[in-house]
Image (cartoon, grey):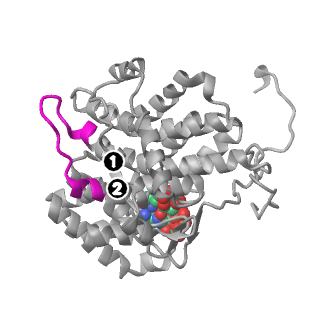
Amino acid sequence: TTGMVTLDPGYTNTGSTTSKITYIDGDAGILRYRGYPIDQLAQQSTFIETAYLLIYGELPSASDLESFTSRISRHTLLHEDLKRFFDGFPRDAHPMPVLSSSVSALSTFYQDSLDPFNPEQVELSTIRLLAKLPTLAAYAYRKSIGQPLLYPDNSLGLVENFLRMSFGFPAEPYVVDPKLARALDQLLILHADHEQNCSTSTVRLVGSAHANMFVSVAAGINALYGPLHGGANEAVLQMLSSIRSEGGDISSFVKRVKNKEPGVKLMGFGHRVYKNYDPRAALVKATADEILASLGGDDELLDLAKQLEEIALSDEYFIERKLYPNVDFYTGLIYKAMGFPTKMFTVLFAIGRLPGWIAQWREMINDPMTKIGRPRQVYTGYPERAYTPAADR
Ligand code: SDX
């Protein structure tokens, strides 16, 4: 049997680890970044301030936040050769592999400053990644709609800059809608870290081999792309849209889920850790009505989502399996109302999760107890047997 392998200190071969960054209580539905409850951060903080908290461990003073913000804004531009990278992708390329490959490629421009054990270079990589990921993400979107790539405008904040590079036009000034910017800022806070989830564990595993921060994050982006992980926010919209297009019969869809029809899951439901309502989903749901009302979102799909949740939460099948909405269940509806296509939803998740990946990578690389990640297995194959020549097989 798999049983519990004894835990080594630091990075254990079971893939679990010690960390001071994020605390989750799956049964109580608690999530805290560096001790601060997620609802207080979502309501009172900003994404860039939360990024500082996750990475450096404390909420910044006003002057520290100002210097952090201005350091980031000086690195939002990409090397012109990297911009040309986007010419090579097919027009309908999914932006997630575009993002992961361009983040890997980004590291090729900084090969002389990627030493994971040089604090100045780790700081520079931190600022470069935080600054350039939104630019890369906006460019992946613009490439997919055949529109020109806009240079960053550093008079804008990180989120406003991303919105302008995504939705702005070269021919006319783009005025960022403050409601849109605040809504996206809050969603990014909710996604900023989540303990040892699949993509963060990937970032730690790759980094534990002393690979640099950029390629470790690129690996995390690839893990997040999976529909069971960050790709679920895209899958939820596809699920809701197909229920609607097939006449909106929620009960028959739920029956298909319960019959475990291949490929039919209640996307946006369930969690490896939360066996209660995901606190992030509750926060998104609470603001969804208000945000969709102000942005003119698809209320029909929101109503469908709420009906689906209501039916599921009263159905023994989901109750006994402790399946509740997770962070991906409602977020896609808001991203759609913001004007993003479903293909961009997981890219938005990646922008949000980046500070967490960076914080966790730095914690891992600075932990003297960290060993290279090397999970063991329970061997269930053949016992020893002798080789037989092809003529005898
Ligand atoms: C994220 O880890 C993190 O922190 C991730 C994340 C983060 O911030 O990084 O929170 C982000 O990835 C959220 C999850 C997004 N994924 C989805 O919404 C995809 C749909 N959900 C699942 O596929 C599933 O719930 C997982 C992958 C999230 C969890 O899978 P588990 O751990 O295998 O689920 P489980 O062991 O709790 O399942 C128990 C039972 C099983 O049925 P039985 O074999 O007991 O009969 O519940 C069933 C599962 O088949 N089940 C589902 C289901 N999720 C679990 N049945 C229908 N629909 C679902 N969504």
Residue at the extreme front of the image, as rendered: 63
Say which of 320 and 34 sits in front. 34
The residue type indicated by label 2 comes to Asp
Question: Residue placed at 21% from the left, 47% from the top?
Answer: 176
Q: Quadrant of residue 132?
A: top left
Question: Residue placed at 55% from the left, 67% from the top?
Answer: 273
In magenta stretch: residue 170: yes
Q: Are marks 1 and 2 in contact (CB under 8 Å)?
A: yes
Q: Quadrant of residue 205?
A: top right
> Which disc is residue 185 wearing?
2
Secondary structure at badge 2 equals helix
Q: Which residues are magenta?
A: 164-183
In magenta stretch: residue 271: no
- Residue 251 visible: no
Q: Neighbour class for label 1 at 10 Å: few (<14), some, many (≥20)?
A: many
Who comes first in sequence, dot 1 or dot 2?
Answer: 1
Pointer 1: what residue?
A: 159
